Image: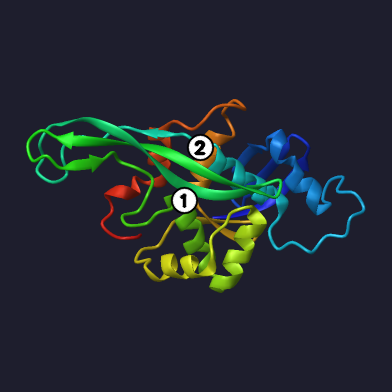
Amino acid sequence: MKFSQNLVNKSGFIISNDNGIIITFRIRKRYLFLIERTGYEGGGNRAMKKRRIPPMLSALVQTTLTSCDGALFDECGVCPHCGGELTGYDIKKKQFAIVVEEDQKRVIHVRVKRFLCQQCGQVSLADQPFYPDIRIGSPVVDLCVTMSETMPYSRVSSCLVEMGIIVDRWSVRNYSQKNHRTIPAADMFGVRVPLSIVSLSSFAMGMPESGQIDGQKLLAACGNPSRNKTLP
């Protein structure tokens, strides 16, 4: 699936694929600085380094990830160890992503409920948007993997910085080398973007300014990665 830019304005942008399907994204006001800093729209006279990532894509990805901040995951079903009945135990905060807003680092956290099994006594986590043994949100991992299909690891890391996402090149390499499946992705502005990000963006752009993505919708968009035994 390949997308190309169709229209850009102060309220957002529209992209369309080769089949004529139109997707509209609304860029929030707090992310307009991404456009302004690059000189694409009213960027001033300050000399800027040439960007490899279009500011519209940077704004889309950042808006999507930050809208996940504070999302709650509180469903587990039965004990994954013995199938026993579960009761609530506590809620754990986990790091989902690290982004940069106005030159300041911001850690995006989500909340994951833990459960205690009444039969075996094991503590289990709710279904969550993390791959097993990976300490960063699955959409960020997916983005590292899909971008690594066409770029060296060091360049992926630097392009993520342009998007306002912090992932070092060694982590990019680690995620990519552990990859065992094809991650569905779309070509957006010349960048391979995972469909988990695209799906999440449809929820993020429709939310009120102070809202957050529903945990179960987020999980569905990510494909419930915590149930996978290995990185995709």
Between 49 and 192, the residue placed more toward the observer is: 49
Give neighbour class at mark 2: few <14, some 14-19, many 20+ (Cα, 10 Å): some
The answer to whether the residue labelled 2 contacts the one labelled 1, judged by CB atoms less than 8 Å apart, is no
The kind of residue on which mark 1 rests is Pro
Q: How many marks?
A: 2
Looking at this rendering, what residue extends furthest in the bottom direction?
Answer: 152
Query: Can residue 189 be seen in this snapshot?
Result: no
Q: Which residue is mark 2?
A: 69
* Percent coordinates x, y for residue 92 in the rendering: 35, 38
Q: What residue is shown at x 46% (from left), y 47% (from top)? A: 96
Report how far apart the C-alphas of labels 2 and 1 lie in the structure. 13 Å
Which quarter of the picture shows residue 152? bottom right
Which quarter of the picture shows residue 8? top right
Question: Left or right: where does residue 160 sit relative to residue 232?
Answer: right
* Percent coordinates x, y for residue 44 in the rendering: 90, 49
- Up the image or down, 148 lies above or below 11; here it is below
Looking at the rendered image, the quarter that the C terminus falls into is bottom left
Q: What residue is shown at x 20% (from left), y 41% (from top)? A: 123
The kind of residue on which mark 2 rests is Asp
Question: Left or right: where does residue 103 sit relative to residue 61?
Answer: right
Between 145 and 20, the residue placed more toward the observer is: 145
Q: Earlier in the sequence, mark 2 or mark 1?
A: 2
Looking at the rendered image, the quarter that the N terminus falls into is bottom right
Between 199 and 108, the residue placed more toward the observer is: 108
Number of the label disc, if any, that sits on residue 46: none
Give neighbour class at mark 1: few <14, some 14-19, many 20+ (Cα, 10 Å): many
- Please tell me whether mark 2 or mark 1 is closer to you in this view: 2
Question: Left or right: where does residue 76 sit relative to residue 112?
Answer: left
Q: Which residue is mark 1?
A: 139
Q: What residue is shown at x 28% (from left), y 38% (from top)? A: 126
